[in-house]
Image: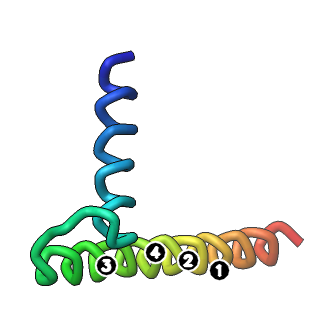
Amino acid sequence: MMALVWLIDVLVIVVKVLGGRMKVNPVLRFGLWVAVLGLFLAGCAVLAALAVLLQRWLEAIA
């Protein structure tokens, strides 16, 4: 349960940094934006790969 609280605290801090509410080094803010966008693109790639695998599997059983 404490791990969930810690995770939420970290998420709130990251959102504050990305939103500009917390004064931090601009390099850190840029790096966090790059990391978030990279995670988003990686998630999109995983979803696309899963869609291709699902299509191949459905074609194989048809």
Separation of marks 2 and 4 at Cα, in angstroms = 14 Å
- Is residue 10 shown above or below 39? above
Which dot, 4 or 1, sits closer to the camera? Answer: 4
Q: Earlier in the sequence, mark 2 or mark 4?
A: 4
Q: Earlier in the sequence, mark 4 or mark 1?
A: 4
Are circles 1 and 2 on residues that touch, CB within 8 Å? yes
Q: Amino acid at mark 1?
A: Val
Which dot, 2 or 4, sits closer to the camera? Answer: 4
Separation of marks 4 and 1 at Cα, in angstroms = 19 Å
* Numbered circle sitting on residue 33: 3
10 left or right of 25 in image: right
Separation of marks 3 and 1 at Cα, in angstroms = 29 Å
Image label count: 4
Q: Amino acid at mark 2?
A: Ala
- Is residue 22 shown above or below 45? above
Q: Earlier in the sequence, mark 2 or mark 3?
A: 3
What SS does tag 1 mark?
Answer: helix
What SS does tag 2 mark?
Answer: helix
Q: Which residue is mark 1?
A: 52
